[in-house]
Amino acid sequence: MNPTLVDSDILSRFFRNDPKVVEKVRVYVEEHGVVSLSIVSYYEILSGLQYRDAGRQLNAFLAFASIHRILPLTLAAADHAARLYALMRKEGTPVDDIDLLIAGIALANGMAIATHNVSHFGRLPGVIVQDWSL
């Protein structure tokens, strides 16, 4: 498997014990040692769990995050995201800023994105998308 950044929706499926996603994560960790997620996905999951007062799930997520790799938003990632933003706006097909930031982090780190949100990420030039839910 190529180095891959795991998107929030795949993480959510993982924590809901989706068998296909759990197996993909297992195989990926076997090959790469850790899962990589962006600081943006970390924020998305954390804020959602805190909003829902989901203490058990929050603890499980924090334990998971503590043993895996959280990639930061860097200047290089912001540059990639801004370029994608401008391109998509000029084409008349804007993409949510959160998805653009995640894509920028993936591009800056030479990674594919594992997501079920193929309709958004699949339109972004240069972004390699893998749907781990299939």
Image: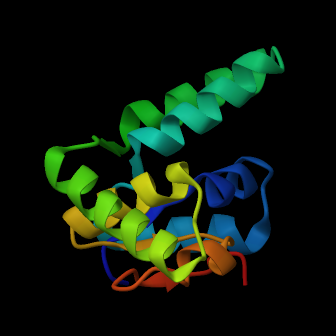
- Left-right relation of 60 to 52: left
Could you say which quadrant of the image residue 119 lies in? Answer: bottom right
Report the front residue among 128 and 63.
128
Indicate the colouring scheme.
rainbow
Residue 103, how many percent across, how many down?
40, 64
Q: Is residue 27 above or below residue 34?
A: below
- Left-right relation of 21 to 67: right
Residue 95, how many percent across, how many down?
58, 64
The C terminus appears in which quarter of the rendering?
bottom right
- Left-right relation of 14 to 43: right
- Could you tell me which residue is drawn at 38 percent across and 67 percent down? 86
Could you say which quadrant of the image residue 47 lies in? Answer: top right
Q: Is residue 45 above or below residue 55?
A: below
Q: Is residue 126 above or below residue 4?
A: below
Report the front residue among 115 and 103.
103
Residue 36, how many percent across, how many down?
37, 54
Could you say which quadrant of the image residue 108 lies in? Answer: bottom left
- Could you tell me which residue is drawn at 73 percent across and 26 percent down? 49
